[in-house]
Image (cartoon, coloured by chain):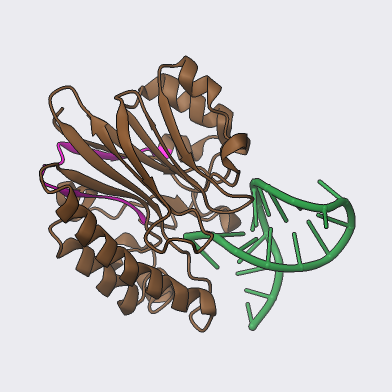
Amino acid sequence: MNITTWNVNSIRRRLERVLEWVDTHEPDVLCLQELKCQDGEFPIEPFVERGYQVSTYGQKAYNGVAIVSRVPHIDVVRDFPIPGDGQARGIAATLLGRTRKVRVVNLYVVNGGELDSDKYAYKLQWLDALVDWVAAHKSAHADVPMVVCGDFNIAPADLDVYDPKRWAGQVLCTDAERARWQRLLDLGFVDSWRQLHANERTFSWFDYRGGGFDRNEGLRIDHHLLSGMQPLEAVIDHDARARAESSDHAPVTVFVAD
DNA sequence: ATGACGCACTTGGTGCGA
């Protein structure tokens, strides 16, 4: 089974790009972030025509997450880890694989704005709530392997940053964010891509501005955390990021045993 | 320090992203 996470930066604006990627790669599971639309505006039909089941959790203009899968999924949960905050950033479901189930948690972590902003304070609060929520969710689904994936808006280490000196102490790279990332790992998860590519400096996000992609100036902030199963392979698809009218994030895929 | 690029939206400048 393969599971892709992709911040698409508006599903309506990106629909053609996403569909051509689906037709080429035929993913089993697609976890999307930054839908930037309400549930009724998500273009479900082209995915259903291709044999996919779609569960969305959207809101107007901002945020929004979805699970799209050709393996059936059940037991969908939305609105976590801070219920009622009006920000659609979390959706989870159980994938019914060929020989086993997998619980998938799809996240769009708070960006955080500037260091001295309310947004950054909320990001840390949100991450604290996430650690507690994942711990409880893992206990509640203890019989099933779990993947927590999405746009974490955290570069876990300097190896995930094109210019660590420039980014030192900046939002996405602060010690406080990285400590919360570590607390997630300490719940019993491994960073799939890093486990398979121990010393590789490769990025999943490249700024639209300043020709970031062409300069290979980016960050690795889109991740799959695995518990109870091993990653067989992990791929960051830079070809998708290189396309005209692409998202600023590349799709990231992890392969696990069916 | 600023802007650069792209997106949504009470569509024209503003907020937001990372």
Pick the residue in front: A148 or A7.
Answer: A148
Q: Quadrant of the N terminus of chain A?
A: top left
Placement of A108 over or under A41, stated as above or below = below
Q: Quadrant of the C terminus of chain A?
A: top left
Rendering colour (chain B): green
Q: Name which residue lies at 37% across and 61% down.
A: A81
Placement of A226 over or under A56, stated as above or below = below
| Residue A48 image position (x, y, % from top left) | 47, 20
Q: Name which residue lies at 14% across and 65% down.
A: A186
Q: Is residue A169 visible?
A: yes
- Residue B12, located in which quarter of the rendered image? bottom right
| Residue B13 image position (x, y, % from top left) | 84, 65
Q: Is residue A237 left or right of residue A183?
A: right
Pick the residue in front: A74 or A110.
Answer: A74
| Residue A243 image position (x, y, % from top left) | 53, 35
Q: Name which residue lies at 54% across and 80% down.
A: A117
Q: Name which residue lies at 57% across and 34% down.
A: A42
| Residue A83 image position (x, y, % from top left) | 43, 61
Rendering colour (chain A): brown
Question: Is A231 contained in the magenta span?
Answer: yes
Q: Is residue A156 visible?
A: no
Placement of A171 over or under A52, stated as above or below = below
Residue range of the region highlighted in magenta in the rendering: A221-238
